[in-house]
């Protein structure tokens, strides 16, 4: 299935080779999908892991910026132009980011990212442009920059302009006018968001590069001691209830998360059968949230992702956390529940957390991360 999505060619003298997230449905290169695909390729064809990540680097601008979607073979379609974060239809890539997981993927699949100046330059760009307060934590300008597009945790922040709602194109249009520049978006009143999951992947990349950990800053700013989970911070602050999603548990993937915090996340939330530990865990939204929608993900014909079903990249990250904290039996249970579902349904974009029915796109590349789980090879970093 991975093979079917593999694309190679040349554009303006630059060679490219990458895995389409899903042939047909997602025909371009997506930043974090490529990172996950590269991690999966290492089991089958390590040369492809390297080529996939080098293709992201091949798209980088001189200052290190790499967009969220890269249009190697053809420009964005007219229809998608309405809600894709490009300045003009001819743009080679979007002006927004996805979670900066490149250095981490390189470390897991290829080698030492600190030896590759272009990787360091890319992560420097991310920090220069998105660490708005100098504490190491990154901010985003749109829900889709987190990779968790229509997750209900963003509804209170972006309201009717949240991703997957009819007014989302207005948010894109407004940010397009502001050059997708986060400082200008902030000056214009926001909203902007400091998200836990984005910062987990950013933190993993920093560790992979041998840079100082941001875990203490993440705990300091986003850990909710009373609730025992992490919360995103929005500016301006939101009032009202923010649904709890798997992103609140995602710091489990950090190798230096204090054990006491990790155990609270696991015992009070992840393993709770009325919240995340459903028959095919972990659901992308806690099952006791009113917004939890396990088997339906469209609204007025618009696709609304991350509102209940289980995604394999999140399962993979939380599984690594379970293993690190010594919950071997539960980690095994997770694999025993997920692997047969993927085998039966194929590589789907996400799965019904009760029945395991495959949903969304087909031949979805990053679901191949299940291979790590089956082989018992968690993504782990040696901490120096
Ligand atoms: C959806 C997902 C996003 C992913 C993209 C391509 O938009 O929410 O995370 O990168 O599809 O697979």
Image (cartoon, grey):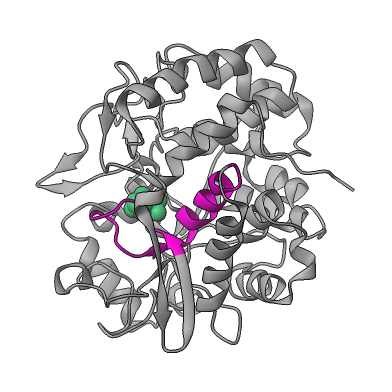
Whether residue 93 appears in this view of the structure is yes
In this picture, residue 20 sits left or right of residue 173 = right
The image shows residue 109 at horizontal and vertical percentages of: 66, 51
Give residue 340's quadrant in the image: top left
Count of numbered labels shown in the rendering: 0
The image shows residue 324 at horizontal and vertical percentages of: 74, 27
Queried whether the magenta region covers residue 192, the answer comes back as no
Queried whether the magenta region covers residue 25, the answer comes back as yes
Residue occupying the point 38% across, 24% down:
343
In this picture, residue 118 sits left or right of residue 150 = right
Residue that extends furthest to the right in the rendered view of this protein: 384
Residue occupying the point 45% across, 21% down:
338
Residue occupying the point 61% across, 18% down:
331
Q: Which residues are magenta?
A: 18-43
Residue nearest the viewer, comparing 271 with 47: 47
Give residue 321's quadrant in the image: top right
Residue nearest the viewer, comparing 293 with 135: 293
In this picture, residue 376 sits left or right of residue 16 = right
The image shows residue 383 at horizontal and vertical percentages of: 85, 45
């Amino acid at each position: 299935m991975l093979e079917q999505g593999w694309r190679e060619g040349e554009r303006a003298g630059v060679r490219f080779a990458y895995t389409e997230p899903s042939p047909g449905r997602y025909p371009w290169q997506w930043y974090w999908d490529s990172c996950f695909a590269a991690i999966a390729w290492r089991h089958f064809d390590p040369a492809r892991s390297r080529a996939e990540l080098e293709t992201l680097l091949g798209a980088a601008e001189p200052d290190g910026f790499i967009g969220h979607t890269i249009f190697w073979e053809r420009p964005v379609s007219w229809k998608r132009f309405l809600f894709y974060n490009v300045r003009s239809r001819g743009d080679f890539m979007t002006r927004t980011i996805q979670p900066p997981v490149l250095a981490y993927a390189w470390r897991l699949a290829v080698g030492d990212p600190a030896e590759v100046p272009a990787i360091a330059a890319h992560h420097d760009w991310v920090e220069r442009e998105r660490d708005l307060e100098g504490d190491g934590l990154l901010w985003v300008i749109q829900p889709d920059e987190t990779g968790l597009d229509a997750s209900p945790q963003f509804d209170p922040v972006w309201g009717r302009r949240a991703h997957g709602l009819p007014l989302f194109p207005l948010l894109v249009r407004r940010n397009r006018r502001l050059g997708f520049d986060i400082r200008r978006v902030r000056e214009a009143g926001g909203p902007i968001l400091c998200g836990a999951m984005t910062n987990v992947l950013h933190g993993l990349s920093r560790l992979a590069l041998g840079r100082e950990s941001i875990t203490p800053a993440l705990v300091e700013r986003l850990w909710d001691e009373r609730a025992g989970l992490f919360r995103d911070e929005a500016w301006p602050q939101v009032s009202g209830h923010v649904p709890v999603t798997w992103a609140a548990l995602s710091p489990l993937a950090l190798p230096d998360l204090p054990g006491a915090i990790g155990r609270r996340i696991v015992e009070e939330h992840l393993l709770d059968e009325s919240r995340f530990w459903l028959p095919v865990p972990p659901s992308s939204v806690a099952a006791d949230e009113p917004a939890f929608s396990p088997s339906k993900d469209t609204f007025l014909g618009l696709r609304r992702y991350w509102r209940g079903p289980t995604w394999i990249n999140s399962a993979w990250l939380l599984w690594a956390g379970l293993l690190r904290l010594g919950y071997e039996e539960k980690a095994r249970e997770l694999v025993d529940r997920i692997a047969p579902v993927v085998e039966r349904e194929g590589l789907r974009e996400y799965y019904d957390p009760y029945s395991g029915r495959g949903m969304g796109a087909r031949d979805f590349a990053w679901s191949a991360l299940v291979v790590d789980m089956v082989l018992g090879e968690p993504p782990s970093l040696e901490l120096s």
